[in-house]
Amino acid sequence: MEAAWDHKLYFPTRVVTKHSGDEVMVEGLREMFRAEKKYSSKYFEKIADLEDMMDHSNQYPVLTKLKEFMWDGMLSWLKAEGIQGEFGVQTHVFPNYGKKGAYVPAHNHQAQVSGVYYVDIPDVNEKQDLFVQEDTKRYWALDPGVLILHDPRGNASLAELSEKNYVKFFPRPGMGIIFPSYLWHSVTPHQSEKDRISIAFNFTIISKEERGMAVEPLKL
């Protein structure tokens, strides 16, 4: 039986994760990044979110397989949130290719559900917990290449006496994470000579009445 997506509530905000357990898919994605040199160029880093990787799915069928995996995570998140009805979904997929010193400042996305799939993470410590939520001192600790999810409640850092107004996610290659698009998140600089490679997903969910554009149907 296939493992389910793991659900956690922080702040409280639902975050779900799952390891694909598919080394063939991971290696296929690595081969794609090796072949597509533009993804690793310094110029492309500035416009990466304008790319839709699904435009290349005929050339790289592994992208369709990856989309199916992350779509399953989106469904798991929506069902757990009690979302019901008929919708259309627009899926936007773009690369995040980070060389030594690369980081991503805090931001969110114009969608409803977002996610990240990790292809290569340098210097993974398998003994490290996936999620860390401690005090402010740990927030400022120099943990390289981690995803930080920030408390979406306004001024939570002033009111949250437990100081747990963030959570750090220490990803592994082959793992996906899904969260609401409004959730502010950032990535700390990584200091390895190896590249940090991930693929971002934005799922824009449109009501049945607004389905005038090209979308995929979704019924919950």
Image (cartoon, grey):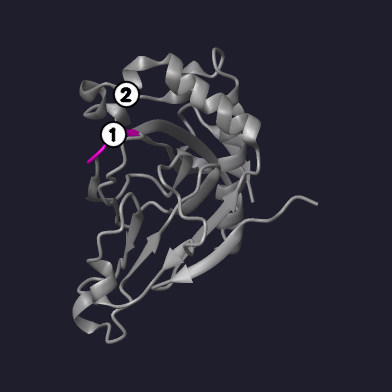
Tell me what residue is drawn at x 46 percent, y 55 percent: 125
Tell me what residue is drawn at x 50 percent, y 26 percent: 30
Q: Disc number at residue 40?
A: 2
Q: Quadrant of residue 59?
A: top right
Closer to the camera, 219 or 108?
A: 108
Q: Would residue 82 be seen by someone viewing this image from the given angle?
A: no
Q: Disc number at residue 99?
A: 1
Dots 1, 2 in contact, CB < 8 A: yes
Q: Which class describes the residues within 10 Å of circle 2: few (<14), some (14-19), or many (20+)?
A: some
The kind of residue on which mark 1 rests is: Lys
Closer to the camera, 160 or 41?
A: 41
Point out residue 92 in the picture as x, y percentages from the top left corner: 43, 33
Q: Is residue 100 magenta?
A: yes
Tell me what residue is drawn at x 43 percent, y 32 percent: 93
The kind of residue on which mark 2 rests is: Ser
**Residue 220, placed above or below residue 136:** above
Identify the magenta region: 97-101
Q: Would residue 71 be seen by someone viewing this image from the given angle?
A: yes
For label 1, the SS is: loop
Q: Is residue 59 magenta?
A: no
